Image (cartoon, grey):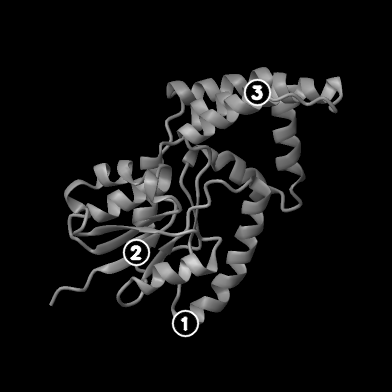
């Protein structure tokens, strides 16, 4: 007897990683998933429905959900028959410091929930090439900062922003690549707590592991960004042209 499809609830499905993940799961050749693809504004569902194709209404349904509203969450869950087997919350508009706090919270929660056979997995991509990031960098580059001193403005506009653009161009993954990794995590019998999607970040991860104090990582990153920008640019260009080919995705 075939297993019943697992119900997967995903937030942020109007674009980016959320959209790609919902479509890939809905198109699973073994039809292992029933996807509830949600978004805050249903007026933006057109792209998702077009990408879902024949899966729409079969293995994928679209629903409204604002994860910041308890009422919206309750309403969404009330429309789902049975239990939610997999919950995918895409934090695509949370700043880095907040994401770090979320990582610590979920790491602690994972220990408690494992007692109830509930697994938590943190899928951690690096830069993801989407329209959102491109528009954000363009917008920030034109913002005026009347209260900032000249040195700070120089570092931000002439050093940090160009490095950020080059980083996204050379190391950025597509939403499809990241979604493929998440699909594999969801299909795992024992999902890992943490999965980084971009193997090009292996060196930075190694620096953190080599020095638990964090000093090696911080000083190296600071040196590349502010003292040796040409070396950073050269390394990023090598990654972009494929000089160092790296596997992307879980083993």
Q: Residue 117: which quarter of the image? A: bottom left
Which residue lies under the disc numbered 2?
8
Residue drawn at (30%, 60%), measured in percent from left and top? 35
> What percent of the width, then of the height, locates residue 116?
47, 82
Distance (Cα) linking label 3 and label 2: 38 Å
Name of the residue lying farthest toward the left: 1
Residue drawn at (40%, 71%), measured in percent from left and top? 77
Q: Is residue 250 visible?
A: no
Which structural element holds mark 2? strand
Residue 116: numbered disc: 1
Query: Pointer 2: residues within 10 angstroms few (<14), some, or many (20+)?
Result: many
The tag earlier along the polypeptide, 1 or 3, is 1
> What percent of the width, then of the height, locates residue 155?
76, 23
Which residue lies under the disc numbered 3?
141
| Closest to the observer, 139 or 154 | 139
Residue drawn at (60%, 20%), measured in percent from left and top? 233
| Closest to the observer, 220 or 28 | 28
Distance (Cα) linking label 1 and label 3: 48 Å
> What percent of the width, then of the height, locates residue 208?
66, 47
Distance (Cα) linking label 1 and label 2: 18 Å
């Amino acid at each position: 007897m075939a297993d019943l499809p697992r119900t997967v609830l995903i937030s942020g499905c109007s674009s980016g990683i959320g959209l790609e993940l919902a479509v890939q799961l809905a198109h699973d050749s073994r039809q292992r998933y029933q996807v509830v693809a949600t978004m805050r504004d249903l007026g933006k569902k057109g792209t998702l429905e077009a990408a879902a194709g024949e899966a729409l209404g079969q293995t994928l349904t679209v629903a409204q959900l604002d994860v910041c509203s308890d009422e919206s969450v309750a309403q969404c869950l009330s429309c789902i028959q049975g239990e939610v087997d997999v919950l995918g919350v895409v934090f695509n508009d949370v700043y880095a410091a907040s994401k770090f706090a979320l990582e610590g919270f979920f790491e602690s929660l994972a220990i408690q929930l494992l007692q109830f056979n509930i697994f938590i997995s943190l899928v951690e991509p690096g830069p993801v090439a989407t329209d959102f990031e491109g528009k954000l960098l363009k917008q920030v580059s034109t913002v005026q900062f009347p209260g900032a001193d000249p040195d700070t403005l120089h570092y931000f506009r002439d050093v940090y922003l160009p490095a950020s653009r080059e980083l996204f161009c050379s190391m950025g993954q597509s939403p499809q690549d990241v979604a493929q990794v998440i699909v594999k995590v969801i299909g795992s019998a024992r999902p890992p707590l943490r999965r980084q999607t971009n193997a090009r970040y292996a060196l930075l991860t190694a620096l953190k592991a080599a020095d638990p104090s964090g000093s090696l990582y911080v000083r190296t990153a600071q040196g590349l960004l502010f003292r040796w920008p040409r070396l950073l640019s050269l390394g990023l260009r090598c990654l972009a042209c494929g000089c160092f080919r790296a596997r992307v995705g879980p083993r």
